[in-house]
Structures are given as C-alpha cells and as structure tokens.
Image (cartoon, coloured by chain):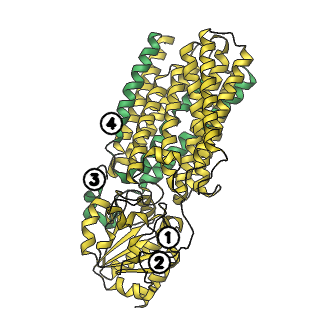
Amino acid sequence: MSNELLTSLAIFTLAILVGFEVISKVPATLHTPLMSGANSIHGIVLVGAMIIAAEADNPVSYILAFVAMVFGAMNVVGGYVVTDRMLQMFRKKPTASKATTEGADGAPGA
Amino acid sequence: MSQQWIYTIVYLAWLAGAACFVLGLHRMNSPATGRSGNQLSAAGMVIAVSATFVYLLTREGGLSTTAMVIIVAGFLIGGGAGLYAARTVKMTAMPQLVSLFNAVGGGAAALVAIDDFIRLNSGAQVDTTIFVVLGALIGSVTFSGSLIAGGKLQGLIPGKPIYVPGGQLVTIALAVVAVLGTVVLILGAAGAFALGSSMTLAVLGLVVLAGLIFGITMVLPIGGADMPVVISLLNSFTGTAAAMAGFVLGNPVLIIAGALVGASGAILTKLMADAMNRSIVNIMVGGFGGGDEAAGAAAGAGGTVREIGADDVAIQLAYAQHVIIVPGYGLAVAQAQHAVRELAELLESKGVDVKYAIHPVAGRMPGHMNVLLAEANVPYPQLKEMDEINPEFDRADVALVIGANDVTNPAARRPGSPVSGMPILDVDHAKSIVVIKRSMGKGYAGIDNELYSDPKTGMLFADAKDGLAALTAAVKAL
C-alpha cells in the first residue's frame, strides 16, 4: 500500500474512535436531533460530488456528477435546516426560567 | 500564489471543517449548547465546500464551463429542494424526512464511487478498487433501504412486516452476488485474469443492483415500530460509504466526517436498541414488531378493564394536586401535542402541578416526544426523563397515559415476558391511572398490558386528540 493510503487509514481509525467518544455521552432526549445532525455531516459527500463534476469529461460522468450534486446538496442543506428546527425547540422558555438548569443536564445513558 | 500554497491552504481548511464537525457534535450533547453545535457543524460544512470550490477553480486547467454549470445548478436544485422540505415539513413527519436525506446522501456516495471507477477503469489499483466497490455497495444499500424505511413511516408502505417470498434465500443469494462480484473485481484489478472494461462495468452494475435489492429486502420485513433503529443503522452506513469515497479521492475531510458519522451512528443505534430491550440482530432479522396494531382483542385472562367517562376523569384531574402525563406513540400519531398542552395549561391555572414523563423511546424516535411537545410550547423543564420522574409517581394523584403502551407495562419487571427487562415508567404507583387509548389493541410487543386491568386504572376509549379535547371541555365546564 502507498504511504498516502496508510496515512488515510490512520486518519480513518482515529476519526472512528473520536466518533465513539463524542456520542457515548449524549442523553436520550437528544438522540433524534443528534441522528439528524450526524445525517447532515455525511452530506460532506457533496465535496466528492464537486470533485467528480470537475473531472467529468463524458455524458455519463456529467449525468452521474449532476445527480450526485443534487443528492449531496439536498442532504447538506435540508439536513442542517431540519436539525436546527428541532434544536430550536429546546430553547429556554421565558415562562419557565426557574428550573432551566435542572432540565438541561439530562440523565446520561438513560 | 503557487499551486502548492493554495493546496496547502485548502487542505488546512478541510481539516478546520472536520474539526468543526467533531466540536459541533460534541456540543450537541446538551440541549443548552445543541443549537450552537449544529451551527458550528454547518459552518464547518460551508468552510469545507468553499475550500473545495476554490481548489477546483485555481488548480491547473481550472473548471470547465460544463463542470461549473453542473456544480452550480446541482447545488441550487438540490439545496433548494432540501431547504423547502426542511422548512415546510410537519414535526411529526420529521423522522421520514431525515430518512429521505439519508437516502440521497447514500445515493450520492454510491454515485461518486461509481463515477470514479468508470474513470479509473483501465488502471484501477487493487486498493482503490476495494474502496470503490465498498462505497458503491454500501451507498446503494442505504439508498434503497432508507427510501423503504421513510415510506413505511410515511404510510406509503404498510408498517407491518412484509415477508418477501423465500426472503432469506433471496437475501443470501443477493449477498453471494455482491461478495462474488467484489472478489471478481478485486482479482481483476490485481491482474489475476483479464476482464474487458465493459465486462468490469457490468460486474460493478451487478453489485450495485444486488445492493439496491438487498436494501429493500432487508427493511421490508421489519415492523414500523423498529424503523428508528433501522434509520440510525443506515445513517451509520452512509457515513461509512462517504468515508470510502474519501479513500478513493484521497480526501481527508470526507474520510474524517464519514468515519465520525459511521462510528457515532453505530453507537446511537445500539443505544436506541438497548432502550427497547432489543438486540440489533434481533431487529434486523425481523422478529415481532407489528407497529400500530389495530386489532381490538379484549383483555385476556389478566382481568377485566374498567371504562371511564370524560366527565369523571375531568373531576379527578381538576381536584388533583400532582398530575403526571405519560405521552406515547399514539399521541404522536394523533398529532395531539397541542391538545395535551392546552389541557395541561388549563389544569395549571387551577393550581394543579403538571409534569410530563418521557420514556427514552416514546414517540417514534428517542427524543422525538420532546421535540413534539416543545413544538407545542410545552416548557422544557416540565419534561422529565424516566429516572427522574419514576420516584414521583408515588406522590401523583393521577397518571394520565396518552397512547403509550409497552413502556408502562408492569410485566416488564418480571422475567418471562417479551418486554422483560425493558425499563418502564412506574405508572402503576400512582394513586389513580387514566389511559386514553383508541382500543384494546396491543403495542409493538404484541402482549396484553397488565396496567389496563389494574383496579386503579380507568380506560377512556378515544383517539388521543378527541379524548383530550373532550377532557378540556369537561374541565372547563366544572
């Protein structure tokens, strides 16, 4: 294997470990917004769609790249907007200022 | 600036984007910082996409007009559709929209891999071939699987398990085709035998087709109630497919973001399955899981149930000191979150202390109930998680169960029941229990709920929305 590939494998492995750590501490309440937030992040495949679009040189590639661009952009834009809408719901209400901190820390692993 | 300098800056921007994803996900650990976390993640996305655009514009040869049109038009059309859908979707329909976004993400990853393979066809190395085939295969499974999962949640496809004739044989056959195809392509790339370029493409096409059908046959036999776990699993798959595309293109931000989502999605899937006392394997094999059964079977040998009228319930509620509302799947289906908030506010104006007990898997996804109630302007501090509220049921005068079933079944405390070991809300500890339910139908576990035959329990048979409206009217009339 090339050096570049080995470096990529190292990055991949470390990123997986980071993913495990970041998620294992999230309270159940936030699982749905979190799934949606992670869903937007894999929209990063849009970057891949841009690169293949730039390298396309025949009709088949044009079509594949175009569809990939549409799909990727939909994943990114829609994903972030709908996640924001969900998380906006958790904003503190003025009527309930007395116990805002109480509800904010959730039960880990519940 | 020289090419090398620009590439260095672009590469650093990609790393900055990846760091934003990690920090953003971390901030989504708590409701207080969740929104800013998502915005940080979105900022990372803007940085990564902009850097890519600059890189493509400035590198040798630049961007052709055709490529520019594809990128800009594709972004505007896809982004516009996504924006419109995300803005207008009702919060109750949000899980299926997430599933749709997941499907297109997986589709994009598969297309990137396929396109790369077509271009490298003559000179693909063994390692590149492995990543291309994995990306195309995983991406196509998530594409079709997520569409079916979303269709089930939307009601376009029946939520009950659908058994494909000879299902397991079909699944095994598809897996064999996919694995064999992959092996053939890898051996071909290694030079073990000479495959013509059209032959190679045909084999890849076969692998993708097997992946697409596999996604369908995998999700169809799984019941509607298990869809959240399936979507979470497919979300993890898409992340992995994106990482594979990153290996093919040698792009760090794709690899990091993809691996991050692949790992976090796997953990999240396990947490969701744990909360339902199911194993992921159990769900994927498609055991019990009928979703929202409509069958009106009467209570079994467990005892008789007591029916109660809205007026009686209204009196109990209005003169209670502590009321705990237990919302469930039925509330989400009936879209009764505004009706429940109205009743709660009315009771509070009469000096009743009202809280909501949220089971980790109430609704259609963990946390879905919180989102629905928050949308109806229920103050967040009134929503109590299971561990926090359970000791309070002893003091509650009335527990009002709305469309929740298995998560309240005391049978879970004893071994020998399908729900044994599942954490439940201690609703049976309340002084009086009122259950609003359409019929005596069973929950996804398909068993009788002993709570209903408890002498303290009164059953108000109604749709959640109509039942709550009747209760509100009755309390007002007091």
The answer to whether residue B459 is above or below residue B63 is below
Dividing the picture into quarters, in which one does residue B213 lie? top right
* Mark with earlier residue (1, 2): 1
Q: Position of residue A6 (x, y in %)?
A: 43, 15
Q: CA–CA distance between discs 4 and 1?
A: 37 Å
Q: Which mark is residue B468?
A: 2
The secondary structure type at the circle numbered 1 is loop
Query: Contact, CB < 8 Å: mark 3 with mark 2?
Result: no
Query: Contact, CB < 8 Å: mark 1 with mark 2?
Result: yes
* Mark with earlier residue (3, 4): 4
Q: CA–CA distance between discs 4 and 2?
A: 42 Å
Q: Nearer the viewer, mark 3 or mark 4?
A: 4
Q: CA–CA distance between discs 3 and 2?
A: 31 Å
* Disc 3 target residue: A105
The answer to whether residue B135 is above or below residue B227 is above
Q: Is residue B63 visible?
A: no
Q: Is residue B205 visible?
A: yes
The secondary structure type at the circle numbered 3 is loop
Q: Is residue A77 left or right of residue B360?
A: right
Q: Nearer the viewer, residue B253 or B449?
A: B449
Chain coloured yellow in this rendering = B
The answer to whether residue A20 is above or below residue A6 is below
* Disc 4 target residue: A21
Q: CA–CA distance between discs 1 and 2?
A: 8 Å
- On whether disc 1 and disc 3 are found on a single subunit, the reply is no
Q: Which mark is residue B336?
A: 1
User: What residue do we see at 64% from left, 15% from top?
Assistant: B120
Q: Position of residue B375 (x, y in %)?
A: 45, 62
- On whether disc 1 and disc 2 are found on a single subunit, the reply is yes
Q: Nearer the viewer, residue B345 or B116?
A: B116
- Amino acid on which disc 1 is placed: Ala
